[in-house]
Image (cartoon, rainbow, N blue to C red):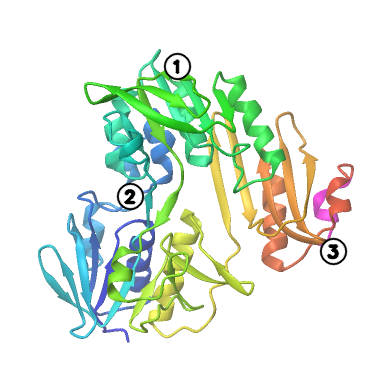
Amino acid sequence: MMGRRVVVVGAGQAGYSLAAKLRDLGHTGPITLIGDETEIPYQRPPLSKKYLLGEMTVDRLHLKPRNFYDEANIALVAGERVESIDRAARAVITNQRSIGYDVVALTTGAVPRRLPAAIGGDLAGVYTIRSLADVDAMRPEFREGRRVLVVGGGYIGLEAAAVAAQKGLGVTLIEAAPRILGRVAAPETADFFRKLHRSNGVDIREGTGLDRLEGDGGRVARAVLADGETIDVDFVIVGIGIDPATHLAERTGLRIENGIAVDHQCRTSDPAIFAAGDCASFPWRGGRVRLESVQNAIDMAEHAAAAIHGATLPYIPVPWFWSDQYAARLQIAGLNLGYTRTVRRPGSRAGAESIWYFEGQRFLAVDAMNDPKAYMQGKRWLESGQSPTPEGVADSARELKTLVGAA
């Protein structure tokens, strides 16, 4: 197993982590890491925050310097697109070459959803945030006094709105659903961030869809909202979610179910092909789940690397996420899927609070706003399989660490 040829398709966080972990585990065979971007592997989360604000340079985005790949004997193939996988011949076919394999790992990530061209989504000045090239293209737009429309009230849209507001732009954010963060967080968490953004001058409009974008000379100039109102804009940021990048897996004939379906060892329906990160769904509590986070990309990729070497432990993560907006930090531990009630708990200082999710009496997840102690305690409970009661969490006079045994 240690000498097998491994080809990793996708050179993002998951791809880098898988290749590096293989070497850490003592893999001696050839490792090829293929990415369609010309940039060497880099972090994505800072793109919509510190990098867009100008507080982080490109070299600090890089996961490792270029010489790391030579020293680790990882063949980094940048700027090439994988067009197919020939399972019979055991070859990965790019737009420039054919690379033989014994094992393939798909870490193809996700692609941002875009507005249809029929409503102006192809106009100049309409951007998504996913890659370094995306952010480099939009950075010149962030000039004080300009007007930006953010379409979508999820975390990416809110983070972009925060950067724009901090740079002195006029920001309007529209969310077609009844409230921001409707798919990912409780109303109490949405309330916290709605208040935060409005206090920083962002015009948040919930239950407001986009009818179309209009342009002058091929560049966006106006947005017509679903209620008929027209607003003038200088540019638009679209943050309406991402989809798993499964096109290659589909062409290869692999099973697709909310992403590339894998088992507990990150194997696809072809035992010689593994998958990890944003593109892959895995078994979870009797169903399947796909996680979009750096933590999952790293942990799942490293689990896949171990499985390639024969490990059999199942992948059962304790998910965690974060989002930075203005000076506020949101930290999330667990998954709130299936929650039936929430408990709000004030923090020990002004501007701090946490929202706790329960399914009946079972603790599922916590959203901690400026409250790292709540986040860490919730994460410890999830990792140890312990559960405080909703009533205990609601009693702010009691310290969290006293609520469950000696946790």
Residue at image mark 3: 405
Which residue in the protein does label 1 denote? Answer: 168
The amino acid marked with disc number 2 is: Tyr
Question: How far across and how far down the image is residue 334, in percent?
Answer: 64, 58
Which structural element holds mark 2? loop
- x and y percentages locating residue 287 in the rendered image: 59, 72
Which of discs 2 and 1 lies nearer the camera? The answer is 1
Q: Is residue 361 above or below residue 87?
A: above
The residue under label 2 is 42
Task: Say whether disc 2 or disc 3 marks the residue closer to the N-terminus.
Answer: 2
Mark 1 surroundings within 10 Å by alpha-carbon count, few (fewer than 14), some (14 through 19), many (20 or more): some
Q: Secondary structure at mark 3?
A: loop
- Specify start and end residues of the magenta stretch as a single range: 398-407
Q: Nearer the viewer, mark 3 or mark 1?
A: 1
Report the side of 43 relative to 203 (left or right): left
Above or below: residue 134 compared with residue 71 = above
Q: Amino acid at mark 1?
A: Gly
* First of labels 2, 1 by sequence position: 2
